[in-house]
Amino acid sequence: MSRRSAIDAARARSAWLFVTPMLVVLAVVAAWPLARTIWFSMTNATLVDLTTYDFIWFDNFVVHAEGRWYGIFTDPQWLRALWNTLVFAAVSVSLELVLGVIVALIVNASLPGRGLMRAAMLVPWAIPTVVSAKIWQWMLNDQFGVVNAMLEGAGFTDGPIAWLGGSSLAMVSIIMVDVWKTTPFVALLVLAALQTLPKEIYEAAKVDGIHPVKVFFKVTLPLIKPALVVAVIFRLLDAMRMFDLVYVMTGSSEETMTLSVFARQALVSFQDVGYGSAASTGLFLIIAMITVIYIMTLKPLGQEKAA
């Protein structure tokens, strides 16, 4: 064995030595619960007795019996939860992306009090989600909420609005709170990307008299595209498994129920471990599909960078 091969083998052993504890922890806290959830999704287990159940294969997902279709993929409530989740993820992530870029551009500019603005914009993101949800639930209360009081005081409304009572308003309210809370996360990622851009490009564009809006779309936006892709995927995955914000603000209401809330209801409220595990597995498959799209999206960017 040559000296170089021996060094490479020693490096590989050292790498495995450092990586092995992390792999063991991942296997315990992630792989084992996931495998157990997939296993239970193919059973009729209940919380009453988790040791006694029958293996029913994919009947919890979809099955045709007695002239009717059963399973989560044909369950109107699960399909409604899927629609709510997709609407919530698409609208909230889109708004957070636009507002995050605007906030990052403002904070990145040479303005007085820029340090204070950077600190202030982190406040919503630093508050735990459950606390934020409870605060906004009180603020949006139709009887004593401060939002209704302000709108009535300013003359915009004639009476209290049930923000969390109606189907459309409840979803709008939840999206609004999520945008308020997580826009700083997107802004931070974009701000980090903006601070790495070479200033010579902007000085040349200024000398050539190019309009700032054109500079943004032709120069800034392409250069921060990798950071935007990362921000979108992180936020999209987080939005697809949204639970705490929705559950605290509207409970298990079908009008705003997400896939995570549906799985919790089946598992805990109805004690149907098999059906709830099938719902959780369905959510996992959707998120895995998005992850694959994420990898396929990032690959061309890496190839462009390498070229």
Image (tube, rainbow, N blue to C red):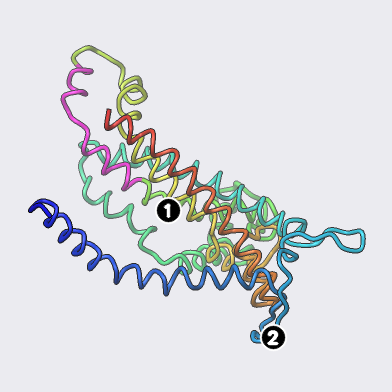
Residue 8: x %, y % from top left: 16, 54
Q: Alpha-carbon neighbours of circle 2 within 10 Å: few (<14), some, or many (≥20)?
A: few
Quarter containing the N terminus = bottom left
**Vertical position of residue 223 compared to residue 21: above or below:** above
User: SS at mark 1?
Assistant: helix
Q: Looking at this view, name the residue that lies furthest to the left.
A: 3
* Left or right of residue 44: residue 35: left
Quarter occupied by residue 190: top left
Considering depth in this image, is 17 or 188 the residue closer to the camera? 17
Spot occupied by residue 120 in the image (x, y as percentages of width and height): 30, 54
As drawn, the label of residue 52 is 2
Residue at the location (45% across, 39% down)?
296
Residue furthest right as drawn: 67
Labelled pair 2, 1 in contact (Cβ < 8 Å): no
Q: CA distance from mark 2 to mark 1?
A: 43 Å
Q: Which residue is mark 1?
A: 182
